Image: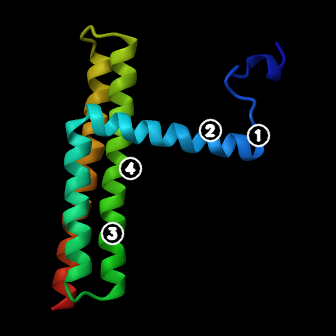
Amino acid sequence: MSDSAKESPFKGKTGLRRLLNATGYSFDGLRAAWQHEAAFRQICLLALAGIVLALYLPLPAWGRGLIIFAHLLGIVVELINSAIEASVDHTSLERHPLAKRAKDLGSAAQLASLVNMASIWAIVLFNHG
């Protein structure tokens, strides 16, 4: 079988059309995450509060940048975690050790990003004062 025969039938757009389609799919994903994932809404609200606070406090630019990056990373990790959960649930709603492992690993990634976020806040605040 040739490589072109193995490609997805959904691939094929190039250039500006591909960019426009990809942007639309991204917004669809953000909309779906906001509508269906409470954890995504929570991490977005945490990011909003954290970023506003970081911009309000008299922090150095490097500190603000790290804090904003940490909050945006938390959003990215939650999107990936939600995608993993949706994929696992689409495959099967039956309990299976590998499905549990996949979901637990996604959850662990989010926990790591939250620990990272708290650590960055602590480092910035400690080194600022």
Q: In this view, does 5 lie above or below 69?
A: above
Q: In this view, does 117 lie above or below 129?
A: above
**What residue does disc 2 label?**
21
Q: Given the image, on which type of amino acid does mark 2 rest?
A: Asn
Q: Mark 4 points at which residue?
A: 76
Q: Which amino acid does label 1 sit on?
A: Thr
Q: Which of marks 4 and 3 is nearer the N terminus?
A: 3
| Residue 15 placement: quadrant | top right
Vertical placement of residue 129 versus 33, above or below? below
Q: Which residue appears farthest toward the right when viewing the image?
A: 2
Q: What element carries label 1?
A: loop
The residue type indicated by label 4 comes to Val
Q: Do tag 2 and tag 3 residues touch (Cβ < 8 Å)?
A: no
Q: Determine the CA span between mark 1 and mark 3.
A: 33 Å
Q: Do the residues labelled 1 and 2 touch (CB within 8 Å)?
A: no
Q: Is residue 71 above or below residue 110?
A: below
Q: What element carries label 2?
A: helix
Disc 4 versus disc 2: nearer the observer: 2
Q: How far apart are marks 4 and 3 (CA)?
A: 12 Å
Query: In front of the other: label 2 or label 3?
Result: 2
- N-term-proximal mark, 1 vs 3: 1
Cα separation, mark 2 vs mark 3, equals 28 Å
Marks 1 and 2 sit apart, C-alpha to C-alpha, by 10 Å
Residue at mark 3: 68
- Residue denoted by label 1: 14
Disc 4 is placed on an element classified as helix
Choose between 115 and 24: the one closer to the eye. 24
Give the amino acid type for the residue marked by disc 3 in the picture. Answer: Ile
Q: Position of residue 127 (x, y in %)?
A: 21, 87
Please report contact status of discs 4 and 3: CB closer than 8 Å, yes or no: no
Residues 46 and 91: in front is: 46
For the C terminus, the image quarter is bottom left
